[in-house]
Image (spheres, rainbow, N blue to C red):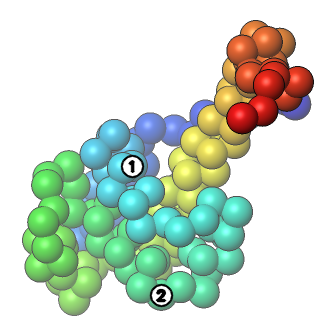
Protein backbone atom coordinates (compact mmCIF):
# COMPACT_ATOMS: atom_id res chain seq x y z
CA UNK A 1 0.00 0.00 0.00
CA UNK A 2 1.38 3.41 -0.96
CA UNK A 3 2.12 5.75 1.91
CA UNK A 4 -0.64 8.29 2.39
CA UNK A 5 0.17 11.98 2.47
CA UNK A 6 -0.54 13.45 5.88
CA UNK A 7 -3.09 16.29 5.76
CA UNK A 8 -1.87 19.74 6.63
CA UNK A 9 -2.07 20.48 10.35
CA UNK A 10 -3.40 23.98 9.64
CA UNK A 11 -6.35 25.31 7.66
CA UNK A 12 -6.82 29.02 6.92
CA UNK A 13 -10.03 30.69 5.83
CA UNK A 14 -11.80 34.05 6.06
CA UNK A 15 -14.05 34.45 9.10
CA UNK A 16 -15.78 37.76 9.71
CA UNK A 17 -13.48 39.45 7.19
CA UNK A 18 -10.21 38.27 8.72
CA UNK A 19 -7.92 35.32 8.11
CA UNK A 20 -8.66 32.60 10.64
CA UNK A 21 -6.22 29.70 11.03
CA UNK A 22 -7.29 26.43 12.64
CA UNK A 23 -4.72 23.95 13.87
CA UNK A 24 -5.70 20.30 14.17
CA UNK A 25 -4.70 19.59 17.76
CA UNK A 26 -5.21 16.41 19.73
CA UNK A 27 -8.05 18.03 21.70
CA UNK A 28 -9.96 19.13 18.60
CA UNK A 29 -9.36 15.84 16.82
CA UNK A 30 -10.49 13.86 19.85
CA UNK A 31 -13.72 15.85 20.18
CA UNK A 32 -14.49 15.34 16.51
CA UNK A 33 -13.72 11.61 16.73
CA UNK A 34 -16.17 11.28 19.62
CA UNK A 35 -19.07 12.26 17.34
CA UNK A 36 -18.06 10.30 14.24
CA UNK A 37 -19.91 6.98 14.40
CA UNK A 38 -18.07 5.20 11.59
CA UNK A 39 -15.00 6.10 9.54
CA UNK A 40 -16.23 3.97 6.64
CA UNK A 41 -19.22 6.26 6.22
CA UNK A 42 -17.55 9.62 6.89
CA UNK A 43 -17.90 10.86 3.30
CA UNK A 44 -21.62 10.18 3.21
CA UNK A 45 -22.15 11.43 6.76
CA UNK A 46 -20.47 14.77 6.06
CA UNK A 47 -22.82 15.29 3.13
CA UNK A 48 -26.10 13.98 4.54
CA UNK A 49 -25.87 14.58 8.29
CA UNK A 50 -26.49 18.32 8.82
CA UNK A 51 -26.10 18.02 12.59
CA UNK A 52 -22.67 16.43 12.26
CA UNK A 53 -21.55 19.04 9.72
CA UNK A 54 -22.79 21.85 11.96
CA UNK A 55 -20.99 20.42 15.01
CA UNK A 56 -17.74 19.97 13.09
CA UNK A 57 -17.84 23.47 11.58
CA UNK A 58 -18.77 25.23 14.81
CA UNK A 59 -16.34 23.18 16.90
CA UNK A 60 -13.44 23.87 14.55
CA UNK A 61 -14.21 27.59 14.37
CA UNK A 62 -14.50 27.87 18.15
CA UNK A 63 -10.78 27.20 18.47
CA UNK A 64 -8.61 25.39 20.97
CA UNK A 65 -10.64 25.92 24.08
CA UNK A 66 -12.54 23.38 26.12
CA UNK A 67 -16.17 23.08 25.05
CA UNK A 68 -18.48 21.78 27.74
CA UNK A 69 -21.80 22.66 26.16
CA UNK A 70 -23.07 23.60 22.72
CA UNK A 71 -23.51 27.19 23.89
CA UNK A 72 -19.70 27.40 24.36
CA UNK A 73 -19.25 27.14 20.58
CA UNK A 74 -19.41 29.94 18.04
CA UNK A 75 -22.93 31.06 17.13
CA UNK A 76 -23.64 30.20 13.47
CA UNK A 77 -25.60 33.44 13.03
CA UNK A 78 -22.53 35.45 13.99
CA UNK A 79 -20.32 33.87 11.32
CA UNK A 80 -19.64 35.86 8.17
CA UNK A 81 -18.07 33.14 6.08
CA UNK A 82 -18.11 31.86 2.50
CA UNK A 83 -19.97 28.53 2.26
CA UNK A 84 -17.21 27.25 -0.05
CA UNK A 85 -14.69 27.78 2.76
CA UNK A 86 -16.94 25.82 5.12
CA UNK A 87 -17.12 22.98 2.61
CA UNK A 88 -13.31 22.95 2.37
CA UNK A 89 -13.10 22.96 6.17
CA UNK A 90 -15.33 19.88 6.37
CA UNK A 91 -13.26 18.13 3.69
CA UNK A 92 -10.06 18.99 5.62
CA UNK A 93 -11.51 17.47 8.80
CA UNK A 94 -12.68 14.39 6.85
CA UNK A 95 -9.18 14.04 5.43
CA UNK A 96 -7.74 13.96 8.97
CA UNK A 97 -10.28 11.36 10.09
CA UNK A 98 -9.66 9.04 7.15
CA UNK A 99 -5.89 9.50 7.35
CA UNK A 100 -5.97 8.51 11.03
CA UNK A 101 -8.07 5.41 10.41
CA UNK A 102 -6.19 4.26 7.33
CA UNK A 103 -2.73 4.67 8.86
CA UNK A 104 -3.86 3.14 12.16
CA UNK A 105 -5.35 0.13 10.38
CA UNK A 106 -2.19 -0.39 8.35
CA UNK A 107 0.08 -0.16 11.41
CA UNK A 108 -2.17 -2.45 13.44
CA UNK A 109 -2.08 -5.04 10.65
CA UNK A 110 1.71 -4.82 10.55
CA UNK A 111 1.82 -5.27 14.32
CA UNK A 112 -0.44 -8.33 14.16
CA UNK A 113 1.73 -9.87 11.45
CA UNK A 114 4.87 -9.16 13.46
CA UNK A 115 3.57 -10.99 16.54
CA UNK A 116 1.36 -13.61 14.86
CA UNK A 117 3.74 -16.52 15.44
CA UNK A 118 4.41 -15.59 19.08
CA UNK A 119 0.72 -15.20 19.84
CA UNK A 120 -0.02 -18.60 18.26
CA UNK A 121 2.60 -20.21 20.51
CA UNK A 122 1.04 -18.66 23.61
CA UNK A 123 -2.48 -19.82 22.77
CA UNK A 124 -3.74 -22.70 24.94
CA UNK A 125 -3.43 -26.11 23.39
CA UNK A 126 -6.69 -27.68 22.12
CA UNK A 127 -5.36 -31.17 22.84
CA UNK A 128 -5.15 -30.55 26.59
CA UNK A 129 -7.08 -32.67 29.08
CA UNK A 130 -10.75 -31.89 29.48
CA UNK A 131 -12.40 -31.77 32.90
- In the rendered view, would you say 50 is above or below 74? below
The mark that comes first in sequence, 1 or 2, is 1
Q: Left or right: where does residue 59 sit relative to residue 124? A: left
- Res. 96 mark: none
Residue 110 visible from this viewpoint: no
Q: Quadrant of residue 102?
A: top right
Tell me the residue that label 2 is attached to.
50
Q: Which residue is mark 1?
A: 29
For disc 1, the neighbor class at 10 Å (few under 14, some 14 to 19, many from 20) is: some
The residue lying toward the viewer, choosing from 84 and 39, is 39
Q: Residue 91: horizontal and vertical position, in percent?
A: 57, 62
Residue at the location (44% across, 38% down)? 9
Q: Looking at the image, which is closer to me, 92 or 48?
A: 48
Q: Quadrant of residue 38?
A: bottom right
Q: Which residue is located at x 39 percent, y 60 percent?
A: 34
Quarter of the image holding residue 77? bottom left
The mark total stands at 2
Position above or below: 71 against 113: below
Residue at disc 2, secondary structure? helix
Amino acid sequence: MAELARPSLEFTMKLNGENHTIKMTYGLFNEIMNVVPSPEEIGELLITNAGLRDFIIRRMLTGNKRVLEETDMIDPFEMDVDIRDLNQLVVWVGDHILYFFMTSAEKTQQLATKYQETIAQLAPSKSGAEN
